[in-house]
Amino acid sequence: MRKFLVGFVSFSISFFSLAIRVEAKSVEAESQVEPLTITAATTDTAYESQWALQASKVSDVWPTTTGSGVIVAVIDSGSGPNPDLDQNLLPGRTITRGRITDNAADVDIIGHGTHVAGIIAARSNNNIGIAGVAPSAQILPIRILDSRGDGSDSDLALAIRYASDQGARVINLSLGGTNQTAALQGALEYAASKGILVVAAAGNGGLTASTTFPAGNDLTIAVTAVDQTLNAPSFTQRGTYIDISAPGISICSSIRFDAIVDVSRRCAGVTEPYALMSGTSMAAAFVSGVAALVFSAKPEFNAQQVREVIIATAQDIGEPGRDQTFGAGMIDAYAIFKALGFFPDKIVFPTVSSLGRVGQEAVGGTVQIPESERLQWYRCLAPGEATLTIPMDCSAIAQAQRNIYIPTRKDLNSFLRFGTLISIGGTPQMRFSETTPKIAAIWTTNTTLEVDIKIAIKDLIESVSNGAESARVISGPCTIRKNVLTTIQSGNCQIRIIAAAKNPYAKLARTVDLIVVAKARSNND
């Protein structure tokens, strides 16, 4: 009996076993749902809770497409019922021990598949709940998981082939395990031969976990999760197989009406069927939704073309270039559609990448603007957006005329801007980036922790000062005893971190928020 891990951390669910083969049946897709007309400010009651839509610029492309005409197969625990999702659900199918049965779409027995499907294609502008990434796409729910979250790799292989024969352009696999079979390899090759993009969760086993499959297969696009600060949560895995990052912390999406969910995780009212979940499952669903948008706008594209444009336009985070933590970087829907030629040229400003810390480099970017004749860093008193005119509160920093600048003690509590002088039709023009975060001299090493983690304050806090470090809890499910912080349950912990005065720094203090998420189960559970 082999078990695989479902790629999310709000429930404890594992996955896989058995090997039985049956003949797949066909299913007729329902008539296409009318496309939606959506603006960035939707009428969905929990839209403001969907930080991920803004962070990845998904709402910027809705005037171009909302995913109409695209079927996304969600191979999971089933999907629905949920009023925000039901209109976009095709008739569901269940595959158990190699047998395909025809069930209604409301077959989700553990809630995972409904949450995943809602991220992809919940309806929008309907005055309830949330907006899916591709709210006019259709979901083909295929259930292969039982009430414990277990299933078989042979059923997965059969489900992939079945979805491939039903017109799916995207297959979402928010699940995974430590290896794969020849049957699964063959199914992925079959999907690839039909131009279908297979999106898979990279896994929640943490830093030392081995490669998760099918995400580790080159025929899938492997997705890891990031939090609201674009950092990697402690449960995310590492490896060269990771292709891209997407939002995966505190994601608000649909659940069944009868789901038993703690009130603290409800995200659209305490009686409404929506909840927060975290994990690479959620991140994978996000990428599947974006892929549906691309296929809708470019129906002639094959899977490789969609994969390439998603990865090539990712926002680089972490180490420069592709890395084993974030892959190519954070998915950027606007950049994808810009690269595809959907948006007219507009003024492009230099960019700035900085964690806002003394002693750690800030990097100015000029890739998308004309060749610069001069570079200059500025120290500012207040935050601000990119601009063509330097704000009155900013002053040039001496000997800071390169694209890399390392903040010093003089920059403490200020904001930095990166400026360029370019020539437009022979006319000089200055362009200034948005500001960096406020420059700090004390910070935490991690912004997302799992429940029941104990971490020494000396390992949690970093500072450029040599003063003794300490911390105290202001609010939230955390405690600090004997200089050790312990996380108790999911939620937000607000703590005050301090470094005692030590020449040349005065006493340093800062209030920070830590996100505490449920502990992920090991892939081998």
Image (cartoon, grey):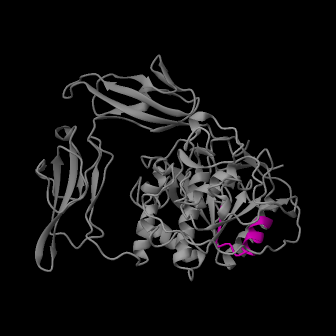
Q: Nearer the viewer, residue 345 or 324?
A: 345
- Determine the residue positioned at 77% across, 48% down: 109
Q: Image quarter for residue 214?
A: bottom right
Q: Nearer the viewer, residue 325 or 97?
A: 97
Is residue 164 located in the magenta-colored stretch of the structure?
yes
Is residue 387 located in the magenta-colored stretch of the structure?
no
Q: Please provide percent x and percent y for residue 474.
A: 41, 24
82 left or right, relative to 394: right
Give the total of numbered labels: 0
**Which residue reaches farthest top?**
482
Q: Please provide percent x and percent y for residue 371.
A: 21, 72
Q: Please provide percent x and percent y for residue 97.
A: 88, 58
Position of residue 476 relative to residue 160, above or below, is above
Can the viewer see residue 187? yes
Position of residue 362 relative to residue 458, above or below, is below
- Determine the residue positioned at 55% across, 43% down: 267
- Determine the residue positioned at 80% across, 46% down: 147
301 left or right, relative to 181: left
Can the viewer see residue 211? no
Q: Nearer the viewer, residue 172 or 509?
A: 172
Q: Image quarter for residue 33?
A: bottom right
**Which residue reaches farthest front?**
127
The quadrant of the rendering that contains the C terminus is top right
**Which residue reaches farthest bottom?**
300
Q: Magenta stretch?
A: 158-172
Position of residue 115 relative to residue 487, above or below, is below
Q: Nearer the viewer, residue 331 or 469?
A: 331
